[in-house]
Image (cartoon, rainbow, N blue to C red):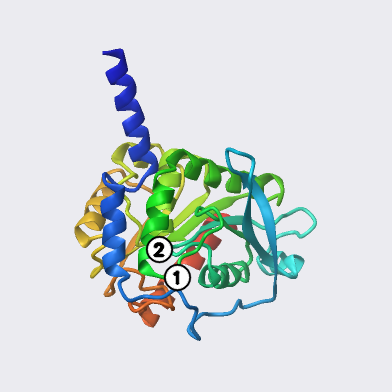
Amino acid sequence: MRLSIVLLALFGFVLLLGCGSDDASEADRMAEEHEGDTPTATEAARAPNSPVTTETVVYTETADGTPVTGYLVAPAHPDSVLEARGQDPSASQLPGVVVIHEWWGLNDNIRTATRRLAGQGYRALAVDLYQGKTAGTSDSAQALMQQAMGRQQRLATNLQDAHDYLRSEAGAPRVAVMGWCFGGGRTFGAVAAAPERYDAAVAYYGNPESVTTDVLRQTTTPLLAHFGREDQAVSIETARTFESRFEETEADGAIHYYDAGHAFANPSGESYEPEAAEQAWTRTTDFLAQHLYP
Protein backbone atom coordinates (compact mmCIF):
# COMPACT_ATOMS: atom_id res chain seq x y z
CA MET A 1 0.00 0.00 0.00
CA ARG A 2 2.77 2.42 0.95
CA LEU A 3 4.61 1.70 -2.32
CA SER A 4 1.44 2.36 -4.29
CA ILE A 5 0.98 5.72 -2.62
CA VAL A 6 4.56 6.70 -3.42
CA LEU A 7 4.18 5.66 -7.05
CA LEU A 8 0.94 7.62 -7.38
CA ALA A 9 2.60 10.69 -5.89
CA LEU A 10 5.52 10.44 -8.31
CA PHE A 11 3.15 10.02 -11.23
CA GLY A 12 1.21 13.12 -10.20
CA PHE A 13 4.46 15.07 -9.92
CA VAL A 14 5.41 14.15 -13.48
CA LEU A 15 2.00 15.24 -14.76
CA LEU A 16 2.34 18.51 -12.91
CA LEU A 17 5.66 19.34 -14.52
CA GLY A 18 4.77 17.99 -17.93
CA CYS A 19 2.23 19.28 -20.37
CA GLY A 20 -0.10 16.34 -20.74
CA SER A 21 -0.81 12.72 -20.08
CA ASP A 22 1.35 11.38 -22.92
CA ASP A 23 4.57 13.20 -23.76
CA ALA A 24 5.30 10.95 -26.77
CA SER A 25 1.86 11.72 -28.22
CA GLU A 26 2.41 15.43 -27.72
CA ALA A 27 5.71 15.24 -29.58
CA ASP A 28 3.96 13.30 -32.36
CA ARG A 29 1.29 16.00 -32.68
CA MET A 30 3.98 18.67 -32.80
CA ALA A 31 5.75 16.72 -35.55
CA GLU A 32 2.58 16.61 -37.65
CA GLU A 33 2.03 20.34 -37.27
CA HIS A 34 5.66 21.14 -38.13
CA GLU A 35 5.99 18.77 -41.07
CA GLY A 36 7.92 20.53 -43.82
CA ASP A 37 9.00 23.40 -41.55
CA THR A 38 12.56 24.57 -41.08
CA PRO A 39 13.93 26.71 -38.24
CA THR A 40 15.69 29.14 -40.59
CA ALA A 41 15.15 32.77 -39.58
CA THR A 42 13.50 34.97 -42.23
CA GLU A 43 13.16 38.66 -43.04
CA ALA A 44 9.88 38.64 -41.12
CA ALA A 45 11.82 38.49 -37.85
CA ARG A 46 11.71 41.84 -36.06
CA ALA A 47 14.65 43.77 -34.66
CA PRO A 48 14.38 45.36 -31.19
CA ASN A 49 12.89 48.85 -30.93
CA SER A 50 15.94 50.10 -29.03
CA PRO A 51 19.61 49.03 -28.84
CA VAL A 52 20.37 45.95 -26.75
CA THR A 53 23.42 44.16 -25.41
CA THR A 54 23.84 40.40 -25.61
CA GLU A 55 25.98 37.87 -23.81
CA THR A 56 26.20 34.16 -23.18
CA VAL A 57 25.99 33.38 -19.47
CA VAL A 58 26.20 30.26 -17.33
CA TYR A 59 23.01 30.26 -15.28
CA THR A 60 22.99 26.67 -13.98
CA GLU A 61 24.64 23.27 -14.45
CA THR A 62 23.56 19.70 -15.08
CA ALA A 63 23.59 16.97 -12.44
CA ASP A 64 27.14 16.01 -13.43
CA GLY A 65 28.38 19.60 -13.11
CA THR A 66 28.32 20.54 -16.80
CA PRO A 67 27.65 24.28 -17.21
CA VAL A 68 24.40 25.27 -18.90
CA THR A 69 24.54 28.49 -20.86
CA GLY A 70 21.77 30.85 -21.85
CA TYR A 71 21.38 33.93 -24.00
CA LEU A 72 21.04 37.06 -21.87
CA VAL A 73 19.85 40.27 -23.51
CA ALA A 74 19.21 43.67 -21.96
CA PRO A 75 18.62 47.26 -23.09
CA ALA A 76 21.87 49.03 -23.92
CA HIS A 77 20.66 52.11 -22.02
CA PRO A 78 18.65 50.82 -19.04
CA ASP A 79 18.48 54.19 -17.29
CA SER A 80 16.67 55.68 -20.27
CA VAL A 81 14.23 52.77 -20.31
CA LEU A 82 13.46 53.15 -16.62
CA GLU A 83 13.02 56.92 -16.92
CA ALA A 84 10.67 56.48 -19.87
CA ARG A 85 8.55 54.16 -17.74
CA GLY A 86 8.47 56.58 -14.82
CA GLN A 87 10.95 54.62 -12.71
CA ASP A 88 13.85 56.05 -10.72
CA PRO A 89 17.03 54.65 -12.33
CA SER A 90 18.99 55.06 -9.10
CA ALA A 91 16.57 52.88 -7.14
CA SER A 92 15.24 50.48 -9.76
CA GLN A 93 16.42 47.50 -11.76
CA LEU A 94 15.04 46.09 -14.96
CA PRO A 95 12.47 43.32 -14.55
CA GLY A 96 13.44 39.93 -15.97
CA VAL A 97 11.84 37.41 -18.32
CA VAL A 98 12.74 33.74 -18.60
CA VAL A 99 12.34 32.89 -22.32
CA ILE A 100 11.70 29.25 -23.26
CA HIS A 101 12.47 28.07 -26.77
CA GLU A 102 10.26 26.18 -29.19
CA TRP A 103 10.81 22.52 -29.98
CA TRP A 104 13.67 23.49 -32.33
CA GLY A 105 15.84 24.51 -29.38
CA LEU A 106 17.65 27.72 -28.53
CA ASN A 107 18.33 28.82 -32.11
CA ASP A 108 18.67 32.10 -33.99
CA ASN A 109 14.91 32.55 -34.24
CA ILE A 110 14.57 32.49 -30.44
CA ARG A 111 17.58 34.75 -30.03
CA THR A 112 15.92 37.26 -32.36
CA ALA A 113 12.68 37.13 -30.35
CA THR A 114 14.66 37.54 -27.12
CA ARG A 115 16.40 40.64 -28.45
CA ARG A 116 13.07 42.07 -29.53
CA LEU A 117 11.64 41.45 -26.06
CA ALA A 118 14.64 43.00 -24.32
CA GLY A 119 14.23 46.08 -26.48
CA GLN A 120 10.91 46.62 -24.73
CA GLY A 121 12.73 47.15 -21.42
CA TYR A 122 13.49 43.72 -19.95
CA ARG A 123 16.49 41.68 -19.01
CA ALA A 124 15.56 38.55 -20.98
CA LEU A 125 17.28 35.19 -20.44
CA ALA A 126 16.66 32.58 -23.15
CA VAL A 127 17.21 29.22 -21.50
CA ASP A 128 18.52 25.99 -23.01
CA LEU A 129 16.45 22.90 -22.20
CA TYR A 130 18.12 20.75 -24.87
CA GLN A 131 21.60 20.75 -23.31
CA GLY A 132 23.29 22.66 -26.11
CA LYS A 133 21.56 20.95 -29.04
CA THR A 134 19.29 22.43 -31.69
CA ALA A 135 17.27 20.80 -34.46
CA GLY A 136 17.37 21.42 -38.19
CA THR A 137 14.60 19.01 -39.16
CA SER A 138 11.23 18.03 -37.76
CA ASP A 139 12.49 14.52 -36.95
CA SER A 140 15.46 15.78 -34.96
CA ALA A 141 13.26 18.31 -33.13
CA GLN A 142 10.85 15.54 -32.18
CA ALA A 143 13.71 13.45 -30.83
CA LEU A 144 15.14 16.35 -28.81
CA MET A 145 11.74 17.18 -27.36
CA GLN A 146 11.14 13.58 -26.31
CA GLN A 147 14.57 13.40 -24.69
CA ALA A 148 13.93 16.62 -22.80
CA MET A 149 10.51 15.43 -21.64
CA GLY A 150 12.24 12.42 -20.15
CA ARG A 151 14.16 14.76 -17.83
CA GLN A 152 11.20 16.36 -16.05
CA GLN A 153 13.01 17.15 -12.80
CA ARG A 154 15.96 18.58 -14.73
CA LEU A 155 13.62 20.83 -16.72
CA ALA A 156 11.99 22.12 -13.55
CA THR A 157 15.35 22.79 -11.91
CA ASN A 158 16.66 24.49 -15.04
CA LEU A 159 13.76 26.96 -15.10
CA GLN A 160 13.95 27.59 -11.37
CA ASP A 161 17.68 28.32 -11.68
CA ALA A 162 17.01 30.73 -14.57
CA HIS A 163 14.45 32.56 -12.44
CA ASP A 164 16.84 32.69 -9.50
CA TYR A 165 19.67 33.93 -11.74
CA LEU A 166 17.59 36.88 -12.90
CA ARG A 167 16.54 37.70 -9.36
CA SER A 168 19.95 37.34 -7.68
CA GLU A 169 22.62 37.89 -10.35
CA ALA A 170 20.72 40.42 -12.48
CA GLY A 171 18.82 42.06 -9.61
CA ALA A 172 15.43 41.82 -11.30
CA PRO A 173 12.68 42.91 -8.86
CA ARG A 174 10.04 40.93 -10.79
CA VAL A 175 10.40 37.99 -13.15
CA ALA A 176 8.05 36.57 -15.79
CA VAL A 177 8.23 33.39 -17.83
CA MET A 178 7.16 32.98 -21.45
CA GLY A 179 7.55 30.49 -24.27
CA TRP A 180 6.26 29.17 -27.57
CA CYS A 181 5.20 25.67 -28.66
CA PHE A 182 7.26 23.27 -26.50
CA GLY A 183 8.21 26.36 -24.49
CA GLY A 184 4.56 27.31 -24.09
CA GLY A 185 3.89 23.97 -22.46
CA ARG A 186 6.92 24.43 -20.23
CA THR A 187 5.63 27.88 -19.30
CA PHE A 188 2.41 26.33 -18.05
CA GLY A 189 4.45 23.63 -16.32
CA ALA A 190 6.60 26.23 -14.57
CA VAL A 191 3.51 27.87 -13.10
CA ALA A 192 2.10 24.49 -12.08
CA ALA A 193 5.36 23.53 -10.35
CA ALA A 194 5.66 26.85 -8.49
CA PRO A 195 2.32 28.71 -8.43
CA GLU A 196 3.74 31.71 -6.58
CA ARG A 197 7.19 32.05 -8.17
CA TYR A 198 6.54 34.21 -11.23
CA ASP A 199 5.07 37.68 -11.52
CA ALA A 200 3.57 36.94 -14.95
CA ALA A 201 3.45 34.11 -17.49
CA VAL A 202 2.83 34.15 -21.25
CA ALA A 203 2.28 30.91 -23.18
CA TYR A 204 2.00 30.70 -26.95
CA TYR A 205 0.12 27.59 -28.15
CA GLY A 206 1.41 25.43 -25.32
CA ASN A 207 -0.40 22.46 -23.82
CA PRO A 208 -2.12 23.83 -20.66
CA GLU A 209 -3.15 20.53 -19.07
CA SER A 210 -0.64 20.84 -16.21
CA VAL A 211 -2.42 24.00 -15.00
CA THR A 212 -5.24 22.26 -13.19
CA THR A 213 -8.13 23.81 -11.29
CA ASP A 214 -6.15 23.43 -8.06
CA VAL A 215 -3.15 25.22 -9.59
CA LEU A 216 -5.36 28.06 -10.81
CA ARG A 217 -6.80 28.45 -7.33
CA GLN A 218 -3.33 28.54 -5.77
CA THR A 219 -1.36 30.63 -8.23
CA THR A 220 -0.58 34.30 -7.79
CA THR A 221 0.84 34.44 -11.32
CA PRO A 222 -1.25 36.31 -13.91
CA LEU A 223 -1.50 34.16 -17.06
CA LEU A 224 -1.74 35.20 -20.70
CA ALA A 225 -2.40 32.40 -23.20
CA HIS A 226 -2.46 32.52 -27.01
CA PHE A 227 -4.13 29.69 -28.95
CA GLY A 228 -4.78 29.05 -32.64
CA ARG A 229 -8.27 27.89 -33.56
CA GLU A 230 -6.80 25.63 -36.26
CA ASP A 231 -4.07 24.16 -34.08
CA GLN A 232 -3.95 20.37 -34.15
CA ALA A 233 -1.04 19.97 -31.72
CA VAL A 234 -2.90 21.85 -28.97
CA SER A 235 -6.50 21.47 -30.06
CA ILE A 236 -9.19 24.08 -29.68
CA GLU A 237 -11.01 21.60 -27.41
CA THR A 238 -7.98 21.48 -25.10
CA ALA A 239 -7.80 25.26 -25.07
CA ARG A 240 -11.53 25.66 -24.36
CA THR A 241 -11.34 23.16 -21.51
CA PHE A 242 -8.52 25.21 -20.01
CA GLU A 243 -10.58 28.37 -20.50
CA SER A 244 -13.42 26.77 -18.54
CA ARG A 245 -11.08 26.08 -15.62
CA PHE A 246 -9.71 29.59 -15.94
CA GLU A 247 -13.14 31.18 -15.74
CA GLU A 248 -14.37 28.85 -13.02
CA THR A 249 -11.53 29.86 -10.71
CA GLU A 250 -11.65 33.54 -11.75
CA ALA A 251 -7.92 33.38 -12.44
CA ASP A 252 -5.99 36.55 -13.22
CA GLY A 253 -5.04 37.07 -16.85
CA ALA A 254 -6.52 36.49 -20.30
CA ILE A 255 -6.92 33.88 -23.02
CA HIS A 256 -6.92 34.86 -26.69
CA TYR A 257 -7.76 32.90 -29.83
CA TYR A 258 -6.57 33.51 -33.37
CA ASP A 259 -7.71 32.26 -36.78
CA ALA A 260 -4.43 30.43 -37.20
CA GLY A 261 -2.71 27.12 -36.67
CA HIS A 262 0.10 25.98 -34.43
CA ALA A 263 3.28 28.12 -34.45
CA PHE A 264 1.48 31.07 -36.02
CA ALA A 265 3.96 33.47 -34.40
CA ASN A 266 7.08 31.75 -35.77
CA PRO A 267 8.29 33.70 -38.84
CA SER A 268 10.42 30.76 -39.99
CA GLY A 269 7.51 28.30 -40.21
CA GLU A 270 4.90 27.41 -42.78
CA SER A 271 2.09 28.36 -40.37
CA TYR A 272 3.26 31.93 -39.80
CA GLU A 273 0.39 34.44 -39.72
CA PRO A 274 1.84 37.98 -39.57
CA GLU A 275 -1.35 39.73 -38.44
CA ALA A 276 -2.08 37.23 -35.66
CA ALA A 277 1.58 37.21 -34.61
CA GLU A 278 1.72 40.99 -34.31
CA GLN A 279 -1.54 41.16 -32.40
CA ALA A 280 -0.32 38.50 -29.98
CA TRP A 281 2.99 40.32 -29.54
CA THR A 282 1.25 43.60 -28.71
CA ARG A 283 -0.94 41.83 -26.17
CA THR A 284 2.15 40.16 -24.72
CA THR A 285 4.17 43.33 -24.27
CA ASP A 286 1.18 45.20 -22.83
CA PHE A 287 0.59 42.34 -20.39
CA LEU A 288 4.23 42.18 -19.31
CA ALA A 289 4.38 45.95 -18.82
CA GLN A 290 1.23 45.84 -16.70
CA HIS A 291 2.62 43.23 -14.33
CA LEU A 292 6.37 43.85 -14.38
CA TYR A 293 6.21 47.66 -14.34
CA PRO A 294 3.34 48.18 -11.85
Type of residue at label 1?
A: Gly
Name the mark on residue 136.
1
Type of residue at label 2?
A: Ser
Q: Residue at x 40, y 70 (%)?
A: 137
Which residue is labeled 2 in the image? 140
**SS at mark 1?**
loop
Is label 1 in contact with label 2 (beta carbons under 8 Å)? yes
Looking at this rendering, what residue extends furthest in the top direction? 1
The percent position of residue 17, horizontal first and vertical second, equals 40, 41
Looking at this rendering, what residue extends furthest in the left direction? 237
Quarter of the rendering occupied by the C terminus: bottom right
Displayed quadrant of residue 53: bottom right
Q: From this viewpoint, is residue 122 visible?
A: yes
Q: Residue at x 32, y 33 (%)?
A: 12
In this picture, residue 232 sits left or right of residue 190:
left
Displayed quadrant of residue 151: top left
Quarter of the rendering occupied by the N terminus: top left
Marks 1 and 2 sit apart, C-alpha to C-alpha, by 7 Å
Q: Tell me if residue 26 comes above or below residue 263 in the rendering.
A: above
